[in-house]
Amino acid sequence: MGKIFRRAIVVALIVAIAVVPLAVSARTVPPPPQEEPVADIAVPAVISAPARPVATDASMEAALLAVRRIITIDDEIFTDFSYSSSFSNWETREGLIWHFNWSGDDASAFATVSADGTLLNYNVWHSGQSFGFAEISVVEALNRAEAFIRRAIPASQHEFFTHVFDRSTNIHSREFSFLIEAYVGSHAFPISSINIGVDKFTGEITSYFTSNIDPTRFNFERADNLISHENAIAAHAENIGMSLEYRSRFNFETNQVTIFPAYTKNEVGTNYISAITGEVVTYVFDRGAVGGYAIGMGGAVAAPQAEADESVGRAWASLSPAERAAVEQVAGFITNEQALDRLLGAMDLSGLDVRAFDDKHISLSRDFVDSSRFVYNVSLFRNLEWDAADDEIRSISGTVDATTGRVRAFNLGYHGTPFLVAGQPMSDSQIQAAVSAFLREMAPAELAASRLESRQAPSIGRFEAAGINNFNYIRMANGIPFRDNGISVAFNQVTGVVTNFSLNWLDNVSFPSISNVLTPEQALTRFVEQNGSRTIYITTGESNARLVYDFGSGLIDPFTGALIDFMGDPMQDQAFTPNYSDVIGHWSERYVMRLLDNGVYNWSGLFEPDRVMNEVEFVAYIMQIEQPWMARMAPQAFLQQRGIDFDASAGRQVTRQAAAKIIVEYLDFGLLAQQPQWFVYPFNDNVSDAFRGYITIAHMLGIVGGDTNGNFNANGNVTRGQAAVMLHNLIIARTAQLG
């Protein structure tokens, strides 16, 4: 009787927790592309009403009828309708485009249509849950997408749009999304594309966005006698090249900065190597021959503040060693008054009466990147009358090193535009001399270790001779630039005042040697060997398109030629969904493939279903249930963020009982699981009380099971195949929990 009573309590608690509704963020329908409006007329009735809607052109009715031949608009759901129109070329009134909007209580839709009835963009949104497994297959979704495209575009364009360049979804998305690039023969024409989304539950087309969907408007260069990619690489190295630079990354877990070298391709997206001649070809934005619509409609932490001692009379002996060190450190800081004096002195404003400012803030904080450095952040602001002089100072802000008193940044804001005040502009040599003198005083060592990267002279119409000059210096190390560090100065060439200064400079960092790096040509060759290349058409003006080699983009490891991310780590190929051919015929196949079809995967290459996982790998795999941005967190940081009491180690293989604990904690049933006396353990083998509740709840939710002998094998290791089953079942449980 007692067991039955306890079981009833557990079931009631589980049900009560599971049915609590959780907030689900509704997807917002993106607005239609902004064009110059011709009309914007709201019609509070469906368009099937007997009276014809008011229109600015007879083509509106034809455009609406064309849309309704392609798209089903349920008049009982979409009770309101509005529209507007625009031109792709406002000056010539060419390319009339209609924008239609439908809405209802729990749904909305929009469509953009050319005057000839060609659908350019479409999106529909219905309220409802998006999390969960798809109810149609990827193949069925693609078939529906292709059928929709055949209805939406003219028959003359069907032959171009047969290549699916990429597909994507995730467990939180309601859509299967397909990117279909135009192909001319066997060569891509990337500026001409269709993005189409299919509802993974109903199969409805929910989004459709096009870019330059009429390739017939371009003259394509014949693809005869292509040069080899080896010759193209050599031509690229000679005529375009790559730049070797230092980059930095900040590890939020260790608070450490790491610097690494990387190659970047010059002029990416602008200059290419011709696949025919090997010469440099420059991309030129081109809409093609005059036609109506194939323009790119949709396409071509605050640092912690230092805390004051609240109890002045506290005995020194009662402080911890760390607290004593902090007190001693703060004792060595300059005062906030001294920081303000240093800032005003650097800005040549020592005589300024700061009492005239309405808001004054000076705070002490730890530098976000260099945790050994504390800085004062100064901010002064005053309200001025509307007719105050243009050169009246409205705001002052800056950063001062709390230990050295060195000014690291400042900005001077005026009431108006001080460079319009009458005055004779300084000569170019005077400007350069003044800026150089300022930097020799403010940052002499950093200036010596930098080079002038860019200088932007003012360009403000008739006042261009009396504006601000912007100087940007970049830090150099071992003869190559470190773009994450540098100096910037803004100088008024009429008043001779420096209005902005910023010293972004890491101290006590080391730069790895670049003595054994590959040459740019060698690095690009290895990069292509590992990642491939393709020939694509780019527009070059006057409706012409030329065939070029596309070597992609991104950072290149200068020692191996591998593609690396902005953290300096090898890039994981997430552009294409892996096929996991090694699970075919394995007992876990249906689970792995269902997860894969729904965008839930964490490895490229092979799946290796019998490979035993360590704890960090298991957590990283379970994290794929989260939104993409969260799924990229470090596993231990994710556990901490979720409040899960588990210290994951890459040096320990994950056990089945540990896996059950992680999953149950993730579902917020941890407190319940810590009451083992409430549970009747469902398996024959023994388990410690510390895991009994977790395993029982995971079993009740259908996430884990036992072997043919009724044993759970709590200390057994988890393979990737078993983890796939757990993740699959976790998604089902989570879907039910969300209601």
Image (cartoon, rainbow, N blue to C red):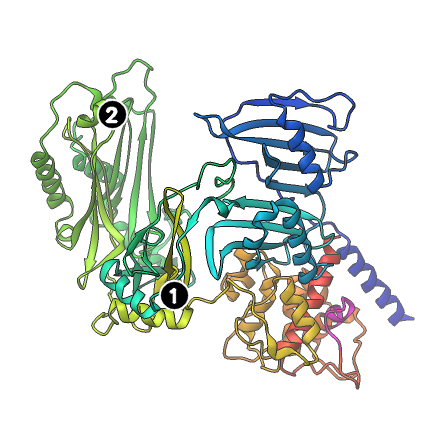
Q: Nearer the viewer, mark 2 or mark 1?
A: 2
Query: Separation of disc 2 and disc 1 at Cα?
Result: 43 Å
| SS assignment at label 1 | strand
Crowding near the residue tagged with mark 2, few <14, some 14–19, many ≥20 C-alpha atoms within 10 Å:
few
How many numbered circles are shown? 2
Which residue was labeled with disc 1? Answer: 564
For the residue pair 15 and 496, the one nearer the viewer reads as 496
Q: Residue at x 48, y 66 (%)?
A: 573
Q: Is residue 543 left or right of residue 667?
A: left
Is 739 placed above or below 711 here? above
**Depth check, front residue: 567 or 643:** 567
- Residue lying at the far bottom of the rendered structure: 709
Residue 357 % position (x, y):
30, 25
Q: Is residue 166 above or below residue 231?
A: above
Considering depth in this image, is 685 or 114 the residue closer to the camera? 114
Is 591 magenta? The answer is no
**Quarter-wise, where is residue 414 in the image?**
top left
Q: Is residue 451 above or below residue 510?
A: above
What amino acid type is highlighted by mark number 1? Ile
Per the image, the residue denoted by label 2 is 461
Q: Of helix, strand and loop, which one carries label 2? A: helix
- In this picture, residue 374 sits left or right of residue 438: right
Q: Residue furthest right?
A: 1
Q: Is residue 368 visible?
A: yes
Q: Residues within 10 Å of mark 1 (few under 14, many from 20)?
A: some
Residue 674: image location, x then y, percent:
70, 67
Which residue is located at x 39 percent, y 58 percent? 318
Mark before the other along the chain sequence, 2 or 1: 2
Name which residue type carries label 2: Gly
Indicate the position of residue 139 as horizontal and vertical percent values: 67, 62
Magenta segment range? 696-705
Horizontal relation, residue 30 to residue 303: left or right:
right
